[in-house]
């Protein structure tokens, strides 16, 4: 028997600690480098949600971290103005006696000078959702909504009140998608506003219904850049807009068919705009990501990483603050890690970190900006989950096409040849992702604390293994990626500290699809858990908010029927013999609820053993801490029952 780390009904069980642990979300460094502000999400008093706080971390690591702001509504998205004033977003009430009632509520932009009191400097009806600052000027840009027919914030507020008073929430779509990023869109349309220190906000233009708040200001505050979202008529192409910050008049637009641009940043002299360019996967071409620079004088676009085989993602490139210096820094997946890279002006690329991603629950690190393959200095912690209840190892094997594969293997304490651990295989989402950093969703450590080993495979279509990894999985979601998954599973189970007779499979999103795929192709697993996984690809590509993306890969099911028959698990539902637990959110727009309902009804009709854990108010991910605890408790008990042979324990909150 495997010794358990904590009993599942212990209120201090690891997944309870995990769900309530503070979550570091943002960092902001002052212009002079002396202050570092972290945005940290902490659980609310009811245990049903998270609220954000701002804390100061000493960059020199001499002092303990300390809270900077505290409000019931939460303070988040820190950034520093040119003069060192801390800016942030908050829904706190404006208590300034001079403020109008309409200026006292909603998420606004706040300024907090060191040693002073916070004051609201911008508010918009319906909230401000993102902002950017100029490096050398007292200018900010922010994203806020307007509605068709409303030119000003005042007109927008009037329209909102009128619709609310007559209880109308209808939306008329004409050229855009209806939902994106896990939420329905409209009728509010994000716009970019620029506010100077001595004037009213200037509307610099619409970001489109699916606007992301991707904005940047030139260092002198004279130009604002933002992305305008793709439309239903050109779903694979967005537009970079550069506008005059004083008038809102467009100066430049950049776009390229089949490409989308994200994460904008101006060079220190304001002469160029650097951003991430993505070419998404189609049936004929693999996904590719690079960094490009737009010269604002000539309009010329230059690929900054033409020979870099991996991708500069996730994250935004950091540009040198020195005028005329073209050095920049970026992160990129690399064989299960996410190092930081430096690109010099001559194009030479240096990996600064020897390993790791440093996106752990609470760690903030300090790095030298030049030295290669270094180990960072860890600054004082904001909270701690240590010691983690196990160790990390790697699994390597050659795929059936000769490609070298690898995976992380997380081993529980006490696993040995004498006491081999049961194994859970957990394919990641994406599919363009990697197990390269800490994740708050389907984290392996709650399973390891329960005594399970967890295999974290990176199959075909994973990032960090070069473009060949994309090519070998292109257009075949259920082909090479599935075979890689099984190859890595077999390689792991060749170890004598793992028990090949007690295995389970659990995946989320694309990982949920691979779990569904595996259920129709093998009976080797004792139980399978599928969270937000695709089941019927024909129905899925019609309903998902990424309809255009998936249709480019799989085509029209009436004319490319063979692609669906080769990849959609639902055609083989009658072959499922493994017990399956489905987990799904009722507000999931990425993988709509119909996929879970179809899977559940198909397996019920065919007499398979299936259960369905439904969260009506959750989306593509499970976000509320009370739901996170319940999900882990349910899936752990499910595996305990089917993999370990223990008696089924229905969680008390589901009784």
Image (cartoon, rainbow, N blue to C red):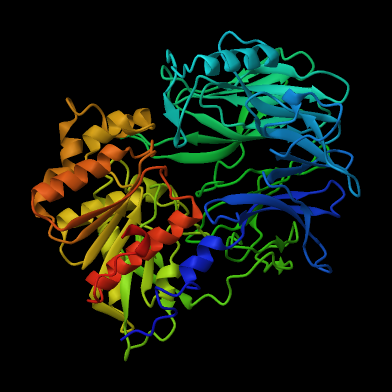
Residue, x 42% and y 73% (percent of image)?
Answer: 448
The residue nearer to you, when weighing 557 against 502, is 502
Residue, x 71% and y 22% (percent of image)?
Answer: 193
Q: Does residue 457 show up?
A: no
In which quadrant of the rendered image does the N terminus lie?
bottom left
For residue 605, side relative to residue 266 (left or right): left
In which quadrant of the rendered image does the C terminus lie?
bottom left
- Residue 142 lies, with reference to residue 631, above or below; the image says above
* Rendered image quadrant of residue 575: bottom left
Question: x and y percent of residue 354 in the render?
Answer: 61, 66
For residue 231, side relative to residue 31 (left or right): left
- Residue 137 lies, with reference to residue 425, above or below; the image says above
Q: Single out the residue that lies furthest toward the top.
A: 149
Number of dots carrying numbers: 0
For residue 317, side relative to residue 337 (left or right): right
The residue nearer to you, when weighing 385 against 32, is 385
Q: Does residue 522 show up?
A: yes
Question: x and y percent of residue 14 in the render?
Answer: 48, 71
For residue 335, side relative to residue 75 (left or right): left
């Amino acid at each position: 028997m495997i010794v358990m780390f904590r009993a599942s009904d212990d209120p201090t069980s690891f997944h309870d600690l995990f769900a309530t642990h503070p979550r570091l979300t943002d960092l902001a460094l002052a212009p002079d480098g002396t202050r570092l502000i972290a945005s940290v999400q902490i659980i609310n008093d009811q245990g049903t949600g998270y609220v954000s706080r701002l804390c100061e971390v000493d960059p020199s690591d001499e002092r303990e971290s300390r809270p900077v702001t505290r409000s019931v509504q939460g303070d988040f998205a820190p950034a520093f103005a040119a003069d060192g004033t801390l800016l942030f977003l908050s829904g706190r009430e404006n208590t300034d006696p001079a403020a109008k009632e309409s200026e006292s509520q909603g998420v606004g932009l706040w300024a907090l000078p060191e040693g002073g009191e916070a004051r609201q400097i911008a508010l918009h009806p319906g909230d401000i959702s993102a902002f950017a600052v100029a490096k050398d000027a007292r200018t900010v840009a922010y994203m806020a909504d307007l509605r068709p027919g409303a030119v000003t914030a005042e007109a927008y507020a009037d329209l909102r009140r009128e619709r609310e008073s007559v209880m109308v929430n209808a939306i008329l779509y004409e050229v855009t998608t209806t939902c994106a990023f896990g939420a329905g869109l409209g009728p509010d349309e994000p716009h970019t506003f620029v506010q100077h220190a001595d004037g009213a906000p200037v509307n610099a233009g619409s970001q489109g219904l699916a606007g992301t708040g991707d904005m940047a200001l030139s260092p002198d505050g004279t130009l604002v850049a933002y992305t305008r979202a793709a439309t239903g008529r050109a779903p694979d192409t967005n537009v970079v807009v550069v506008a005059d910050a004083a008038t809102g008049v467009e100066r430049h637009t950049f776009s390229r068919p089949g490409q989308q641009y994200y994460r904008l940043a101006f060079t220190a002299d304001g002469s160029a705009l650097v951003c991430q360019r993505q070419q998404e996967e189609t049936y004929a071409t693999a996904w590719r990501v690079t960094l490009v620079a737009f010269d604002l004088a000539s309009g010329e676009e230059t690929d900054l990483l033409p020979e870099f085989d991996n991708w500069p993602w996730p994250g935004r490139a950091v540009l040198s603050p020195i005028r005329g210096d073209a050095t920049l820094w970026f992160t990129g997946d690399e064989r299960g890690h996410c190092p930081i890279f430096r690109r010099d002006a001559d194009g030479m690329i240096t990996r600064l970190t020897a390993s790791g991603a440093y996106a752990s629950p609470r760690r903030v690190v300090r790095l030298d900006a030049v030295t290669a393959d270094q180990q960072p200095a860890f600054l004082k912690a904001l909270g701690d989950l240590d010691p983690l209840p196990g160790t990390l190892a790697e699994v390597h094997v050659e795929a059936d096409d000769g490609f070298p594969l690898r995976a992380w293997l997380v081993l529980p304490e006490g696993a040995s040849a004498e006491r081999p651990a049961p194994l859970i295989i957990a394919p990641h989402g994406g599919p363009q992702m990697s197990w390269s950093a800490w994740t708050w969703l389907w984290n392996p450590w709650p399973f390891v604390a329960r005594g399970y080993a967890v295999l974290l495979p990176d199959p075909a279509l994973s990032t960090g293994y070069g473009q060949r990894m994309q090519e070998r999985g292109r257009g075949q979601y259920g082909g090479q990626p599935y075979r890689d998954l099984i190859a890595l599973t077999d390689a792991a189970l060749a170890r004598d500290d793992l028990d090949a007779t007690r295995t389970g499979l659990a995946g989320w999103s694309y990982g949920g699809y691979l779990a569904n795929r595996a259920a129709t192709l093998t009976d080797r697993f004792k139980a399978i858990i599928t969270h937000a996984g695709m089941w019927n690809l024909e129905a899925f590509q019609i309903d998902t908010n990424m309809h255009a993306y998936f249709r480019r890969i799989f085509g029209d099911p009436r004319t490319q029927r063979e692609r669906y028959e080769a990849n959609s698990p639902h055609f083989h539902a009658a072959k499922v013999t493994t017990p399956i637990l489905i987990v799904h959110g009722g507000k999931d727009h990425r993988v709509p609820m119909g996929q879970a309902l179809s899977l559940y009804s198909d397996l019920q009709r065919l007499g398979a053993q299936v259960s369905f854990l439904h969260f009506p108010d959750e989306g593509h991910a499970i976000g509320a801490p009370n739901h996170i605890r319940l999900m882990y408790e349910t899936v752990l008990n499910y595996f305990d029952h089917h993999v370990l042979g223990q008696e089924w324990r229905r969680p008390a909150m589901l009784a």
